Amino acid sequence: MTARVIDGTAVARRVREDVARGVEKLLAEGGTAPGLATVLIGEDPASEVYVRNKRRLCVAAGMADHHRHLPGDVDQATVAALLDELAADPAVSGILLQLPTPEHLDSEALIARIPAEKDVDGLTTANAGLLAQGRPGLRPCTPAGVMTLLEEYDVALSGAEAVVVGRSVLVGKPMAQLLLAQNATVTIAHSRTRDLAEVCRRADVLVVAAGIPGLVGADAVKPGATVIDVGIHRGEDGLHGDVEYDAVAEVAGAITPVPGGVGPMTIAMLLANTLTAATVQQGRAS
Amino acid sequence: MTARVIDGTAVARRVREDVARGVEKLLAEGGTAPGLATVLIGEDPASEVYVRNKRRLCVAAGMADHHRHLPGDVDQATVAALLDELAADPAVSGILLQLPTPEHLDSEALIARIPAEKDVDGLTTANAGLLAQGRPGLRPCTPAGVMTLLEEYDVALSGAEAVVVGRSVLVGKPMAQLLLAQNATVTIAHSRTRDLAEVCRRADVLVVAAGIPGLVGADAVKPGATVIDVGIHRGEDGLHGDVEYDAVAEVAGAITPVPGGVGPMTIAMLLANTLTAATVQQGRAS
């Protein structure tokens, strides 16, 4: 048996095209273009690449790019003041503080200054609370991207056994909430789980977001299961995920590759969140 | 095998005694007595009993009782104004809006007016977000009470399989978060779960909060498991829970009775939250 490959690159492209059409519709109805403010601090090369891609795809979707670059030795009050300025600016629909910030800054306190309705990364405590209570809000991009992949590939979730490996605030925990909202029976496994392979083998839908290369092998996968690999690790022979791809692809029913699986979805959902934020702020139905 | 009976009445008494000692300590250090504002709307007899018990135990623990009773036909703006007044009153450490409110009122909008630091029921979106992100905050009383019972009875949680039946915002969802924070492998099951008994049988710790009398029978319990019954239903022959007590007590290692299990813990944790809120508001370590 060889798994169907879930093509995140293609789905992400369709999501971005939908966002571009949504921006056109917003403009045609007399609204203004959504604006994304990316805040980059310092010169980390990986962060620079991420931010550049976000800005490029934001502009390609017809949205305004409000980029701000601050020096790596900037103080907390200066970043806070910038975030307050962006929060008050009606042209800015969404604010993204690129993480990690330099160590001398308190990133939690900075994120807390982003108003919930402009928190397009879905990182604030306010949006975490809305998700936990099943109320409308902006969802974290990576788990939202996983949900879109599952939907696009018609993966049945109601009553399905879903297992999420990893319990980070950014991915694992919101992932579990989103799967639960679609009526899956959800298990959260993590580093203290006694027999990880046994727990994973229960899953009809297995989402691995542990940050450990090759953590999940074929022995941890039920035949026919859908396997979503959120991990991304740079090795000497290219990028790898948390899942042993070649072996698991022989057992699973469907699987995301690394690269080209979950990765491209994260930026696509950021753009979708920015459109949603703008639509709500401009008083239109989202 | 007959299960050990988890005595919630005794544990709740100890918690209330701890709270009373905490209040004395706060006063001895120059602080002021914590104050609990209970807001009751209308004449529902069950709600009146609940509120009377909360007020009585609040006073017994040395705290001030700020009760407010509004007529059942009060309008939204009047309740909102009262909540704003209590929010601004430094003598009020905690605010409890007794639920359910009459149908013509928007209880979600009312709860949203309670500041997170006075939300001693742990119901606000802000406190749900703090719990979801693993940050300090006031936790919902019933799941916090379950955690205290598990701790008092030395139930091992790290690496244990925990299953929560029910996904309410009030109990099931925060329960799962609290068990996860203690490093359990947590599964949330619910009405759409395919084979509930099979899922429950995995549990070393089984928390049932489904609101369905006798939902969980002996076939759904692993021998030796700890079974916590959050359900409470009034029948012709007295109170019953979501668990078939007599049959399950033959299989489980430990079990909470109904009444006398989780029930008494809810008010005890409300008092504990009120003391915590007062301590934080008065600028002391909690």
Image (spheres, coloured by chain):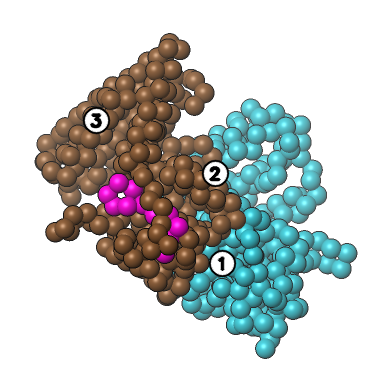
Chain colours: A cyan, B brown
Percent position of residue A216, x then y: 70, 69
In the structure shown, which secondary structural element does the residue marked by tag 3 occupy? helix
Q: Quadrant of the N terminus of chain B?
A: bottom left
Q: Which residue is mark 3?
A: B55
Query: As displayed, is residue B77 above or below residue A194?
Result: above
Tag 2: amino acid = Gly
Percent position of residue B30, x then y: 43, 11
Kindly identify which numbered label has been placed on residue B134: 2
| Marks 3, 2: nearer the viewer | 3
Chain for mark 3? B
Kindly identify which numbered label has been placed on residue A163: 1
Percent position of residue B95, x then y: 31, 32
Query: As displayed, is residue A153 above or below residue B78?
Result: below
Percent position of residue B161, x then y: 54, 60
Magenta region, residue range: B251-261
Q: Determine which quarter of the picture holds residue A204.
A: bottom right
Asked if the magenta segment contains residue B259, the reply would be: yes
| Marks 1, 3: nearer the viewer | 3
What is the CA distance from the residue labelled 1 to the residue labelled 3? 43 Å
Left or right, residue B179 beside residue A67: left
